[in-house]
Image (cartoon, rainbow, N blue to C red):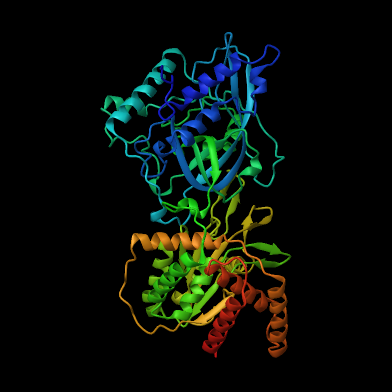
Amino acid sequence: MVGLPYDFLANPLGAVRLSFEKAVAEAPPNVDPPAAFRGKDWGVLDLFRDFLFEQGGLSQVPVLDASTIRWIQPNTLVRVRGMVQDMLGNEFYIGAYKDGSIWRTNKFTDSALFPMPPAYETQLWERHLFHCVPIPGQNSWTMELSPSPTVRNMLGCCTSQHGEKRRREEDADGMDLNCSDHGDQTSPSSSKKQKEDEYLCHPSHSSAELVNHGCSLQQSNVANFDASSLSCLVKVYDMPESHIKLNDVFEFIGIYTFDPDPVVHNDDSDDLMDDLMEDVMVHLPPSKVPRVHCLICRKLAVQDFLSNFHVIEPLPSIVKGIRESLLGHLSMALGNDGLAAQCVLLHLLSRLRARVDVVTVGKLSLNLTSFTRESASVFGNQLTAAIQMLLPFTHAIPLTVEYLNTATLKPRKNNQTGRLVAGVLQLAEGTHLTIDETHMQAGVLDSNGVENARLLKHLMEWQTVEYDFEYYKLEMAADVQLLILSEGKSNILPADLVLPFRPTAVAAAVNPSAEELQAWRWYLATLKSLPHSSEPEMHQLLQDELVAAMRGDRSLGCTDLNRLLTMAQLMSSSFGEKTLSLERWQMVKELERLRKERLK
């Protein structure tokens, strides 16, 4: 049997080219194939889906990150996992052109695979641009390892691309196909400007250099990249722009392209330079920011970052044992404070479930008080380390007057560059944020400090972050768990649940086993997304008890009642139960009674 004429991993563009030519050849005589294929798939995606998911090829695709970009070759298949930090609008490009009597395509690439003749018939197509960055606060245990490169694989990859490069260089330099249009993510109707033939896309020299050096693994293709903050410009095809939203966490599988040479422009006209200052090529140059042309993408959930994750029904018999061991682990980190451990567990299971008018349903921020700087350095650090080992995305802020005055928490749009400048609070959904106020000392907040304190408070109360677009402000929805460690009740960040911390012992640090960590991570990820409902009888009981509680304590308000209902739902979820029972409601009432005793 004759093998495939292309390699999905080392030469994915071969699959694109040959499948396009086949689709054109098989098109009916009365159909203009290039026009018909605009914004549509001609069958190439099915080829990649079959290779990736039916033939098991997904495990062979390397993850493009700071550790692998040193050896991954351009024009090969990669995976990128990251957060959509900015939406850069749409880009026009020459998607198809006629070479003599043959139609060819430039889809999924930045430059023509074949020399484009001086006079040719073209089809202008469109793609979406997204700036993708490493997920803020992503913990190292979630990083997926890529298949290790071998010299044989590298040589094969190098040889394939070197041959392609030589074919291009023997004819003519490739023509740039990009016509950028930079729109705000909030302005889908923004104008689109076509810029044909503005840039000369040089083919990559890195493959040839690797061949000449015997494919030494120490040879870097990307000397100009900042490994600590590797980001990608992802180009998405044939998909509604609304499918991908700002701050979404996605996995993109696509073709990696890289141009090590800065682009040189020969046109010195003022109009051209004005246009260039608005173009993504200037502020995200291909010599520093790799491009990934997306073939397949999917939005990621917490479960996708857990190794060996299996979808198992959270039966109470299974959940109970895991719950007890996790509570024991949290209690040990908190100096045997079992009450604090129970509150932390409910806090870790919380998430924003809905927004009803001005009420955010499901969140449960926690303020552990009675910390000093010394005790925070012990128990606070132990708790922070424990949470980092349990949740995929965590971030810690040692809050001081200087930090509030100098930090950039709010994302801002730079209208000169057309770029969204990230702030500390531009976080992915499900991120856990620990704020340590024990470092706070007397001082004066300037205007930036006051604004930052307001932003943190707003995030805690409403689960929204204000983005500054220079001429207007925009509230963006968030889902961030907030834990505050403070000496007294925080005046800056009013949490839903306040509990004085009472440690009784300093336990030696105990490293849980890999099996325990895996079970705890499964427990939190599974039960956090568990649906919840209440029976009519239980609903009536809760209503009667809450009315009676308000009559007995006039200080109780709607916020307190909402918190109690949230805690009841989380208590049920912690046992793997989808409906609230009288037993779990009694447990919440006892937890609340013990908490109020400490507050006295």
Q: Position of residue 58 (x, y in %)?
A: 44, 38
Q: From the viewer's perspective, is residue 515 above or below residue 567? A: above
Relative to residue 369, is residue 513 drawn left or right? left
Query: Which quarter of the figure is the N terminus placed in?
Result: top left
Task: Give coordinates of residue 122: x percent, y percent.
Answer: 62, 18
Residue located 53% across and 15% down the image: 116
Q: Quadrant of residue 3?
A: top left
Image coordinates of residue 245 in percent, x first then y, are 61, 47
Q: Nearer the viewer, residue 474 or 378?
A: 378
Q: Is residue 35 left or right of 385 when viewed as pictured?
A: right
Is residue 399 something that shows in the picture? no
- Tell me if residue 342 can be seen: yes
Identify the image quadrant of the C terminus: bottom right
Residue 117 picture location, percent across and down: 55, 12
* Residue lying at 53% horizontally and 71% vertically, measured from the top left: 346
Residue at the limit of the structure toward the top, as seen here: 101
- Viewer-proximal residue among 590 and 535: 535
Query: How many circles with numbers are drawn on the protein?
Result: 0
- 514 over 131 or under it: above or below: below
Front residue of this view, candidates 368 and 29 = 29
Query: Farthest residue toward the front?
Result: 317
